[in-house]
Image (tube, helix red, strand yellow):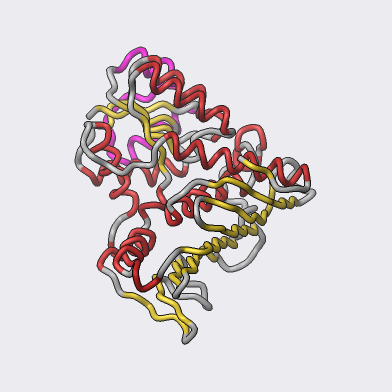
């Protein structure tokens, strides 16, 4: 399968290395606004392929089966449209777009031009997420009905190693809500098994970063369960955890060891937590994701993150913004 790489920034490195590890693709071309950076990227990854300054030129001169888009959030729609109109399948780095309406338009483009498209909601493929889902399936009767999910992220977001476009509201579409909220909402939807119906949210910001949220808190209602999402982007130990509370017990995912929490999946009861050892802990999330996506592009059965699911995530983020500005709950 001949793949074109769109954008050769930070996330492209991780994505391309994972694609190469699958052994299933030929990286046939790259495009990057600064061609010299694209050429350096190609050389560093052992890719002998032309580098173009624009996506349009790459699509015009190359016969591609699919494109992997790794660009700032606000560029996604136009690049999706350009690929779809050429009949090129699409693998899109998350978030799919910067609004629910924009994402709905991409669904229409996919169907109009008959292409396949999937979104890199990679956290679904994290070993602990995969292990937790299996543990829940294996213990469904013991746990009972899911009642509530609590998803928490703390991290130092505003640091000088982050690419500059993240601090441009026009390119990024926002701050932590767009970058990490998309992960959290998708995690909740996947673990809970249903989409959000109502949200109440509050967002905060720092005066030195106008137009960028620096944290948020949200309460949500979904199909059969409720949830809480919290994210704070201030200097602190990196925390990323999800707790699912059931009628008869709980399951907790701790994605980082940070001095207080250890990496792993835990079964919980009133007596405390017990760490569960699981073979899925050793999986490579990015390789698993791209293997799944390549299966999908080839028409094989695959559980890839769909455009419809990614659209629901953006609709929740839209509703969170509306709830913050209106000071009341918003129904989707």
Corner quadrant of residue 295: top left
Rendered residue at 61%/33% (across/down): 171
Q: For the view shown, which residue lies furthest in the bottom direction?
A: 271
Rendered residue at 25%/44% (across/down): 291
**The N terminus lies in quadrant:** top left
Rendered residue at 33%/14% (across/down): 61
- Taking the image as shown, residue 214 lies to the left or right of residue 246, namely right
Q: In this view, does 24 lie above or below 160?
A: above
Q: Where is residue 111 in the image (x, y as percent from the top left)?
A: 39, 21
Q: For the view shown, which residue lies furthest in the top direction?
A: 60
Q: Which of 20 and 127 is in front in this view?
A: 127
Q: Where is residue 108 in the image (x, y as percent from the top left)?
A: 45, 21
- Taking the image as shown, residue 186 lies to the left or right of residue 233, namely left
Q: Nearer the viewer, residue 15 or 325?
A: 325
**The C terminus lies in quadrant:** top right
> For the image shown, how many numbered marks are present on the structure?
0
Q: Where is residue 53 in the image (x, y as percent from the top left)?
A: 45, 21
Q: Where is residue 192 in the image (x, y as percent from the top left)?
A: 45, 55
Q: Which of 302 and 74 is in front in this view?
A: 302
Residue 45 included in the magenta stretch of the image: yes
Magenta segment range? 34-62
Q: In this view, does 52 lie above or below 263?
A: above
Residue 185 included in the magenta stretch of the image: no
């Amino acid at each position: 399968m001949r793949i074109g790489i769109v954008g050769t920034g930070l996330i492209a490195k991780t994505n391309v290395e994972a694609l190469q590890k699958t052994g299933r693709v030929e990286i046939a071309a790259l495009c990057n606004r600064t061609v010299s950076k694209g050429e350096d990227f190609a050389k560093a990854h052992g890719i002998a392929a032309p580098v173009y300054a624009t996506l349009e030129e790459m699509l015009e001169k190359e016969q591609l089966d699919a494109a992997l888009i790794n660009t700032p959030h606000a560029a996604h729609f136009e690049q999706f449209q350009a690929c779809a109109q050429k009949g090129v399948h699409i693998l899109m780095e998350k978030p799919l777009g910067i609004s629910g309406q924009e994402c709905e338009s991409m669904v229409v483009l996919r169907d109009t031009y008959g292409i396949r498209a999937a979104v890199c909601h990679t956290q679904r493929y994290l070993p602990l997420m995969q292990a937790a889902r299996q543990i829940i399936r294996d213990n469904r009767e013991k746990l009972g009905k899911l009642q509530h999910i609590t998803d928490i992220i703390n991290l130092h977001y505003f640091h000088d190693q982050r690419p500059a476009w993240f601090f441009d509201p026009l390119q990024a579409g926002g701050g932590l809500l767009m970058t990490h909220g998309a992960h959290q909402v998708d995690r909740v939807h996947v673990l809970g098994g249903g989409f959000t119906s109502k949200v109440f949210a509050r967002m905060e910001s720092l005066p030195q970063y106008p137009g960028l949220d620096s944290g948020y808190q949200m309460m949500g209602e979904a199909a059969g369960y409720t949830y809480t999402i919290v994210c704070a982007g201030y200097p602190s130990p990196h925390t990323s955890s999800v707790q699912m509370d059931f009628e008869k017990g709980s399951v907790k995912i701790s994605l980082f060891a940070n001095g207080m929490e250890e990496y792993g999946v835990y079964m919980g009861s009133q007596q405390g937590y017990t760490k569960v050892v699981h073979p899925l802990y050793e999986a490579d999330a990015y390789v698993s994701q791209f293997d799944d996506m390549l299966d999908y592009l080839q028409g094989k059965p695959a559980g890839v993150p769909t455009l419809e699911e990614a659209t629901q995530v953006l609709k929740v983020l839209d509703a969170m913004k509306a709830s913050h500005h209106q000071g009341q709950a918003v129904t989707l």
